[in-house]
Amino acid sequence: MAEESYFDRISKQIKTGNEPFKWYRNRIKELGTPSVPELLRSGDLNRTPAFGSLNMFVYSPKLRNKLPYYDTFPLVLPLKRYSNGFLGLNFHYLPYALRARLLDAAGGDNLSISAIENNRLTRPCLKRYLYGFTKSAFRKIPDDDNLTAIMLPVQRFKKASATEVWSDSRKMI
């Protein structure tokens, strides 16, 4: 029998499917923050990101020495393919409430890129990723786990705290 994933444990607690933002945050606090390896090994892993879905992966940017800060464990909705990578929205660059607003604008469980193309919330999240700098496979998030995924406190910012990054993001919006 397969080991129960973190997402499975949250799903077992969902009663209506319409639990509020605060409910998710409280359940996640109760279960504790999952580790990066736990999240990666508990789902479908792919060599390339799944377009139209959220993806988690380990990343070390090419220009990390020049960037003011960066996320080494992005949660990304890929938008555009390139021969050497892709353009995507990293939800970790937004505080939790704004992540939920962006996810809702994108369609929640049925993500639509066209629905958020001109949304101001995407400004701080738009990032280019190069395949040569990914350090793990891509873990596709099942559509019904999107809300849980954006509520997980698993951003791994380097050179700045999440609070500092989110402050900058609010200024961009």
Image (cartoon, rainbow, N blue to C red):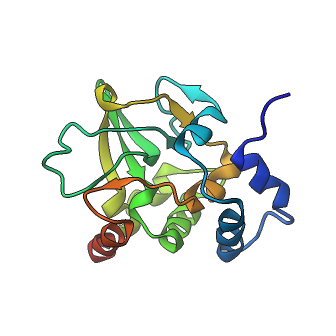
Residue 80 vertical position relative to residue 158 in the rendered view, above or below: above
Tell me residue 139's x, y (percent): 56, 35
Q: Is residue 173 left or right of residue 90?
A: left
Image coordinates of residue 74 in percent, x first then y, are 43, 47
Q: Residue at x 71, y 60 (%)?
A: 31
* Residue at 13%, 49% in the rendered image: 66
User: In the picture shown, does residue 8 fall above or below 58?
Assistant: below
* Camera sees residue 79: yes
Occupied quadrant, residue 17:
bottom right
Specify the farthest residue to the left: 66
Q: Position of residue 144 (x, y in %)?
A: 71, 50
> In this rendering, is residue 163 above or below 128?
below
Image quarter in which the C terminus is found: bottom left
In the image, residue 56 lies at what x, y percent? 50, 42
Q: Is residue 5 left or right of residue 36?
A: right
Q: Nearer the viewer, residue 52 or 148?
A: 148
Along the viewing direction, whichever of 97 and 157 lies nearer the viewer: 157
Left or right: 36 as drawn, with respect to 16 = left
The mark total stands at 0
Indicate the quadrant where residue 131 lies. Answer: top left
Q: Is residue 134 left or right of residue 6?
A: left
Judging depth in this view, the residue of 31 and 116 nearest the camera is: 31
Residue at image position (26%, 40%) is 61
Which quarter shows the N terminus? top right
Residue 140 seen in the figure: no
Question: Residue at the spot x=54%, y=51% of the render?
Answer: 112
